[in-house]
Amino acid sequence: MAPTPTPPSAAMPRTTPPPDDFRRVIGHFASGVTVVSTWRDGRPCGTTVSAVSSLSLDPPMLLVCMNERSATARAISASGHFAVNILREDQAATAERFARKGDDKFAGVPICREPGGLPLLVGALATLECRVVREVVGGTHSVFLAEVDRARARAGSPLAYFRGRLGSLDYELWSSAPQRATAREEDR
């Protein structure tokens, strides 16, 4: 009879990296860049967010993680709705603008209202209009689990975030990646 393995938590003392070390290490994970937007007191509000992930295809769901002290996070908690505007590679200035604190982020920024009524950035690579189904707290952040009510995409390449910098993906390098990923999924 094989010995029962010791759970990792019992075998090793718990250690956590200092916040600066964790930020440096997690910065090696590349992500897309979005502006998450909603309404607050009849005015659009939004902030730059890179912590966005698909969650489910059926029903279509995603999750967004935001600092719980963010005015936009508080507005989403109150309204129960938000939009994810996926930025194009030439929208770094937009990402930087919405990353700053302040109430005038939308001044001079063209927005449109589609049937869902949420403020969508004109020219975004893609937009997703979402309805919060659950909000949980993890550390300093609110995690919004949301169903996607509407989704639209345009041709183009996304803005990327890697090791504290905004940039673009090499489209030629990755242009055939979806076919390879799909083939691997079918082999399972």
Image (cartoon, rainbow, N blue to C red):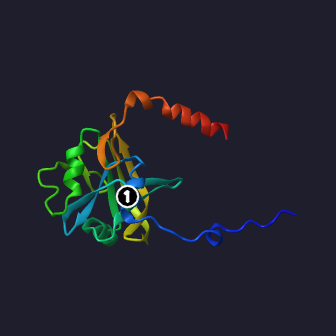
Closest to the observer, 153 or 73 = 73
Closest to the observer, 50 or 39 = 50
Q: Position of residue 108 (x, y in %)?
A: 11, 50
Residue of label 1: 23
Instruction: Answer whether residue 128 is visible to the viewer in this image.
Output: yes
Point 33% across, 48% down: residue: 33
Point 61% across, 36% down: residue: 184
Quadrant in which residue 83 is drawn: bottom left
Q: Position of residue 175 (x, y in %)?
A: 44, 29
Taking 49 as reference, is 138 left or right? right
Q: Quadrant of the N terminus?
A: bottom right
Instruction: Answer whether residue 87 is visible to the viewer in this image.
Output: no
Taking 117 as reference, is 58 left or right? right
Quadrant in which residue 122 is drawn: top left
Name the kind of residue labelled 1 in the image: Arg
Point 36% across, 61% down: residue: 20
Residue 48, compared with residue 167, is above or below; it is below
Point 25% across, 68% down: residue: 71
